[in-house]
């Protein structure tokens, strides 16, 4: 005889729709959106799918994506880093000043990255030891570092950078019939390294645990302060790397460089499915989020959308991404 409870459970089961299944697979949903944007733009414009335009898009969002990897680690751990944009400019300023003083490219780049790593470490100490809210701690650091950028240069950009340094941001690597920008290749390498860190190491497991429930993680014996400190330190380092590539591409180290980029970096992570409440997401989502943002900017230009209104469109996309994330958490 058929059990009534089992038969009622079978009757209540409904096969999830395609939209629900897609929402459950976050990365697949992002790829679906990205593919849809590419298809629509290829139909609306003649220049979007040209090799020159595609590689320009790749190069343009590579340093944002690299910085967003570090931001993603911080957000997954339950924090946020508002100093990323200032750190990008700071690494370029330090490196440019050393290069103009006659130091080698290797030494200048390493020292530029070391300084931003220390800034990230300082952020981590303020959050983990002084118990400052991440928003307040990094907001203060953002202002301090930007002030250093202006004070050290007296507001003047640093020019006449050596060709060897500029090659970091302007070189294309031949791959069969393609010429792929070096920053894009480095972006993929850092994405793989960050993925391995988060998905294949004990530190990565602890990062998700701290972001998901810091109190429970502490009870489980995880050193939550250490995890946060490492997360902010990596964010500073990766922002510095992004800043070096950006400076090499532009050919000038300006104190105004990366102004407002901290919002783009956070937006790339959020659009990529990194939950602002912590404990969820991965760097591949951040990579796709950065690509979506840059393709959107490129589309607005190609379609003749007025430049003054472009930030409004980007802001609407960010709000939409957060709303989708909140809806997915409630329904999926």
Image (cartoon, rainbow, N blue to C red):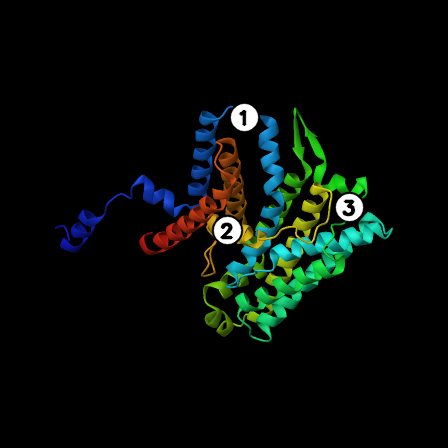
- Of 46 and 236, the residue lying toward us: 46
Q: Which of marks 1 and 3 is in front?
A: 3
- On residue 267, the disc is 2
Residue at x 45%, y 67% (from the top left corner):
213
SS state under label 1: loop
Q: How far apart are marks 1 and 3 (CA)?
A: 32 Å
Q: Nearer the viewer, mark 1 or mark 2?
A: 1
Residue at x 61%, y 55% (from the top left corner):
85
SS state under label 2: helix
Question: What residue sits right under mark 3 in the picture?
Answer: 159
- Of 6 and 100, the residue lying toward us: 100
- Above or below — where is 124 with respect to 185? below
Left or right side of 273 for 153: right
- Above or below — where is 304 with respect to 331? above
- Residue 327: image location, x then y, percent: 34, 53
Q: How far apart are marks 1 and 2 (CA)?
A: 26 Å
Q: How crowded is mark 3: few (under 14 residues within 10 Å), some or many (20 or more)?
A: few
SS state under label 3: loop
- Residue 130: image location, x then y, percent: 59, 76
Question: What residue sits right under mark 1 in the picture?
Answer: 47
């Amino acid at each position: 005889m058929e059990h009534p409870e089992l038969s009622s459970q079978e009757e209540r089961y409904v096969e999830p729709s395609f939209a629900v299944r897609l929402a459950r697979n976050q990365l697949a949903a992002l790829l679906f959106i990205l593919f849809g944007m590419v298809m629509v733009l290829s139909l609306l414009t003649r220049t979007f799918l040209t090799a020159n335009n595609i590689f320009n898009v790749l190069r343009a969002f590579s340093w944002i994506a690299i910085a967003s990897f570090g931001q993603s680690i911080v957000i997954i751990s339950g924090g946020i880093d508002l100093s990323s944009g200032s750190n990008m400019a700071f690494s370029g300023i330090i490196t440019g000043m050393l290069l103009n003083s006659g130091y080698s490219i290797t030494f200048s780049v390493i020292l530029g990255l070391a300084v931003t790593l220390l800034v990230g470490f300082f952020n981590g100490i303020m959050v983990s030891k002084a118990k400052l809210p991440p928003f307040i701690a990094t907001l203060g650091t953002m202002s301090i570092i930007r002030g250093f950028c202006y004070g050290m240069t007296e507001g003047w950009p640093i020019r006449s950078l050596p060709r060897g340094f500029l090659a970091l941001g302007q070189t294309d690597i031949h791959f069969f019939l393609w010429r792929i920008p070096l920053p894009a290749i480095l972006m993929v390498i850092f994405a793989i390294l960050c993925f391995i860190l988060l998905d294949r190491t004990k530190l990565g497991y602890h990062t998700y645990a701290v972001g998901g429930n810091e109190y429970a993680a502490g009870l489980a014996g995880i050193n939550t302060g250490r995890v946060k400190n490492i997360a902010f330190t990596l964010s500073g380092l990766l922002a510095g790397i992004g800043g070096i590539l950006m400076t090499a591409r532009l050919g000038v180290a300006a104190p105004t460089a990366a102004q407002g980029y901290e919002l783009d970096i956070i937006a790339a992570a959020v659009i990529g499915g990194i939950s602002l409440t912590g404990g969820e997401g991965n760097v591949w989502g951040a990579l796709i989020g950065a690509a979506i943002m840059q393709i959107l900017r490129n589309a607005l230009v190609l379609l003749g959308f007025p430049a003054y209104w472009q930030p409004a469109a980007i802001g609407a996309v960010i709000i939409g991404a957060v709303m989708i994330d909140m809806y997915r958490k409630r329904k999926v």
